[in-house]
Amino acid sequence: MSTRTTADEHATRARHPAVLALPVLAAVLVVSVLTWQVTGGGALTRLDVTIRDGLAAYTAAHPGVWGAAKLAADLGTPTVAAVLLAVVAVVLSVERHTGSPVYRAAFALFLLAVCVLFMKGLIHRPGPDGGHPPGLNGFFPSGHTASALTCYGTILALLGAGRRRAVRAAFLAVLVVLGVVVGAGLLVCAYHWFSDVLASVAISFAILWLTFPPGHGASLRPGHSIGR
């Protein structure tokens, strides 16, 4: 069997609706369980408190950590991440003479706004300090985490289109590290609960999977063939 035939068969299987749906359903299940725990005061909320108190004690003993953590958390500022994604998408569309980067970026941003704002308004969870943001927003899920992973993940996927497997694998590693850094910064600064961050990781994964499904153009999955 030729390499070409094998690649085509992998692409066909990747396009199967079940392959596309299962990861998204898994993410929905994770978010559903987290929502149930948060709204019902389950065991995970007690873990949230334990993590918050432990990090508060650590930052009190090491005050210099807070400044670095705030810089890390600010990497996920929604407006900054979204504007950067928009600029990169436009530049790549002009450079490659295709509207695909702009369409994918717009789709990812649309899903990000709908999912995060809907959940925040629905749950209206108070923050680790007990406060509420203005309006109908809550702290669950974390907008900063979702913005960082979705926007920067989209940027890296667009930049990785057509590149070698090693480059895409490196981009994926960068995204994972970035997510950990932003999430840790939010927790250390007590801007969010642990479950807020965890829910946003699942939401961002689903958004990126839908924006860059296997077998359909740009992707960060290092084992998959990429086309412009």
Image (cartoon, helix red, strand yellow):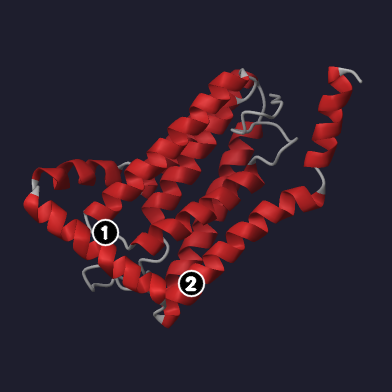
User: How far across and down, in percent of the image, does residue 103 sit?
Assistant: 63, 39
Where is mark 1, residue-wise? Answer: 191
At 52% from the left and 50% from the top, the residue drawn is: 204
At 89% from the left and 24% from the top, the residue drawn is: 5
Amino acid of disc 1 = Tyr
User: Looking at the image, is mark 1 or mark 2 nearer the viewer?
Assistant: 2
Disc 1 crowd, CA 10 A, few/some/many (<14, 14-19, 20+): many
Would residue 143 be found to the left or right of residue 73 on screen? right
Q: Is residue 184 visible?
A: yes
Name the foreground residue: 185 vs 126. 185
Amino acid of disc 2 = Thr
Judged from the image, the secondary structure of the residue bearing numbered disc 1 is loop
Q: Can residue 76 be seen in this view?
A: no
Mark 1 and mark 2: span between their CA atoms? 18 Å
The quarter of the rendered structure image containing the C terminus is top right
At 45% from the left and 38% from the top, the residue drawn is: 176
Residue furthest bottom in the image: 40
At 55% from the left and 27% from the top, the residue drawn is: 169
Disc 1 to disc 2: CB gap under 8 Å: no
Q: Place residue 211 in its image quadrant.
A: top right
Vertical order, 3 against 63 (above or below): above
Would residue 198 be found to the left or right of residue 55 on screen? right
Vertical order, 124 against 26 (above or below): below
User: How far across and down, in percent of the image, does residue 203 sit?
Assistant: 53, 56
User: How far across and down, in percent of the image, does residue 20 sit?
Assistant: 73, 49
Vertical order, 101 against 108 (above or below): above
Query: What label does residue 94 carry, if any?
Result: none
Judged from the image, the secondary structure of the residue bearing numbered disc 2 is helix
The quarter of the rendered structure image containing the N terminus is top right
Vertical order, 202 against 179 (above or below): below
Where is mark 2, residue-wise? Answer: 35
